[in-house]
């Protein structure tokens, strides 16, 4: 039978019993005054998915290539947003060896769509110097973005990279020198936010 909660002065709320109960259900009320939240309230986190990538990838292409870092999530509502948090690092080298002064670019694709408002999320340009061994240098990066996929289908987000000159090679999740020993751990987190 349903439970009826009467208001202090007027009105009431009924808690109905599910049509089928497989086991005992328990509702725990807070011990202090407050408001019971609804899971679907706008701004609530509905689910969190994380992907940790310890592989490596290289490219010297001037079009976006996969890094190998990706995460898949299935939104529960078309009104949900997906908050993406991505951290990673990369190394680089240039042949012939000379000053760098080239642009490295990273972006995130939702399936086949580049979701960056300006076609890219992160640009990295080096100091123009002949006195730095760029093969020994690494750069730490982070991207945070709130996406609106408007779907309840499984959705995959991929981090992609490119350079602006074929002489420069990007080494994702590793340094360029010494054969890329000691790869890192790149991480992408996708959080479904109620819309």
Image: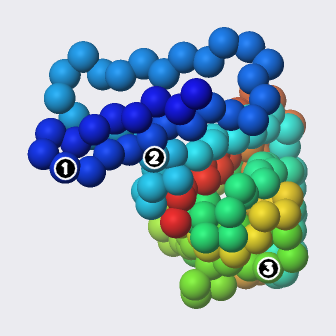
Dividing the picture into quarters, in which one does residue 160 lie?
bottom right
Disc 3 vs disc 2: which is toward the camera? 2
Q: Position of residue 104 (x, y in %)?
A: 66, 70
Mark 1 vs 2: CB contact within 8 A = no
Front residue (pair 60, 84): 84
Q: Nearer the viewer, mark 1 or mark 3?
A: 1
| Residue 99 in view in this figure | no
Residue drawn at (69%, 70%) of the image: 78
Q: Residue at x 53, y 32 (%)?
A: 2
Residue at 58 percent across and 87 percent down: it is 118
User: Does dot 3 land on a helix, a strand or a loop?
Assistant: strand
Q: Is residue 114 above or below residue 107?
A: below
Residue under pointer 3: 113
Disc 1 or 3, which lies upstream in sequence?
1
To which residue does mark 1 refer?
10
The residues tagged by marks 1 and 3 sit, at their Cα atoms, a distance apart of: 53 Å
Q: Nearer the viewer, mark 1 or mark 2?
A: 1
| Residue that carries the numbered disc 2 in the rendered image | 38
Numbered disc 2: secondary structure: loop
Marker disc for residue 192: none
Q: Residues within 10 Å of mark 2 (few under 14, many from 20)?
A: few
| Residues marked 3 and 2 touching at CB (< 8 Å) | no
Q: CA distance from mark 1 to mark 2?
A: 23 Å
From the viewer's side, name the closer residue of 179 and 189: 189
Q: Residue 140: percent from the left, percent from the top?
A: 54, 48
**159 or 7: nearer the viewer:** 7
Describe residue 75's horizontal placement relative to residue 65 as left or right: left
x then y, percent, for residue 94: 76, 64
> In whole angstroms, how far apart are the C-alphas of marks 3 and 2?
32 Å
> Circle 1 sits in a helix, a strand or a loop, which is it?
loop
């Amino acid at each position: 039978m349903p439970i009826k909660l009467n208001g202090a002065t007027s009105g009431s709320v009924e808690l109905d019993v599910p049509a089928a109960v497989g086991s005992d259900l328990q509702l725990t009320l807070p011990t202090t005054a407050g408001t019971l939240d609804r899971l679907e309230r706008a701004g609530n986190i509905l689910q969190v998915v994380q992907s940790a990538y310890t592989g490596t990838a290289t490219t010297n292409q001037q079009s976006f290539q996969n890094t190998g870092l990706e995460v898949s999530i299935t939104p529960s509502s078309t009104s949900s947003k997906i908050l993406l948090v991505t951290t990673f690092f990369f190394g680089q080298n240039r042949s012939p060896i000379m000053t760098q002064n080239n642009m490295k670019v990273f972006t995130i694709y939702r399936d086949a769509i580049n979701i960056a408002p300006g076609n890219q999320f992160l640009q990295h340009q080096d100091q123009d110097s002949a006195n730095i061994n760029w093969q020994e240098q690494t750069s730490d990066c982070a991207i945070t973005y709130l996406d609106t996929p408007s779907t309840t289908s499984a959705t995959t987000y991929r981090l992609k990279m490119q350079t602006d000159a074929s002489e420069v090679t990007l080494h994702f999740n590793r340094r360029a020198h010494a054969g890329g020993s000691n790869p890192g751990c790149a991480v992408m987190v996708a959080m479904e936010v109620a819309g």
